[in-house]
Amino acid sequence: MRWTYIVSALLMLGATGASANLTSDAKKRAETQQKLTKALQGLSPVARSNCISLRYTRGTERYGDTILYRANNKLVYRTDTSGGCFGLDRGDVIVTRTYSDQLCRGDIARTVDPVAQFETGSCSIGEFTTYKAP
């Protein structure tokens, strides 16, 4: 009988810990979504495409599984990855291999730790949505 109480107590503690992790994850996702919304503030989605030209992009911004390729303050390309690029949230470097100046849906992105220089994840690039200032 005593064993049953110990097991029950341990299960309750484990459930409490898992619940705290779920709450923490939900809070982090909400914060990330707020940051993404702020980054796209003043811009409207105008088109969808399978590829973008990297020639005119000046940098990337990461928000969870979403990557923004910024051409300027009035033109941004958004792609939602398939997940798996675990280093995006930590600020790891995004590495893609392209054989032209275009990045296309289905291309593989890898994340690399900038200090240790080892791969931390990989994901597939999704469809691009073009955001422009009105």
Image (cartoon, rainbow, N blue to C red):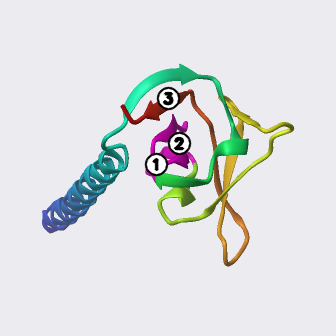
- Determine which of the numbered discs, if any, sits on residue 129 in the image: 3
Residue at 13 percent of width and 64 percent of height: 5
Q: Position of residue 12 (x, y in %)?
A: 17, 60
Q: Is residue 118 above or below residue 86?
A: below
Would residue 116 be found to the left or right of residue 97 on screen? Answer: left
Above or below residue 14? Residue 99 is above
Identify the image quadrant of residue 113.
bottom right
Q: Secondary structure at mark 2?
A: loop
Q: Earlier in the sequence, mark 3 or mark 2?
A: 2
**What label sits on residue 58 in the rendered view?**
none
Reading the chain from its start, which is encountered first: label 2 or label 1?
A: 1
Residue 69 appears in which quarter of the rendering? top right
| Residue 83: mark in rendering | 2
The numbered mark at residue 73 is: 1
Q: Is residue 78 magenta?
A: yes
Point out the stretch of residues depicted in magenta: 63-84
Q: In this figure, what is the number of numbered marks?
A: 3
Q: Residues within 10 Å of mark 3 (few under 14, many from 20)?
A: many
In three-dimensional space, the C-alpha distance between marks 2 and 1, rounded to whole angstroms, equals 26 Å
Disc 1, SS: loop
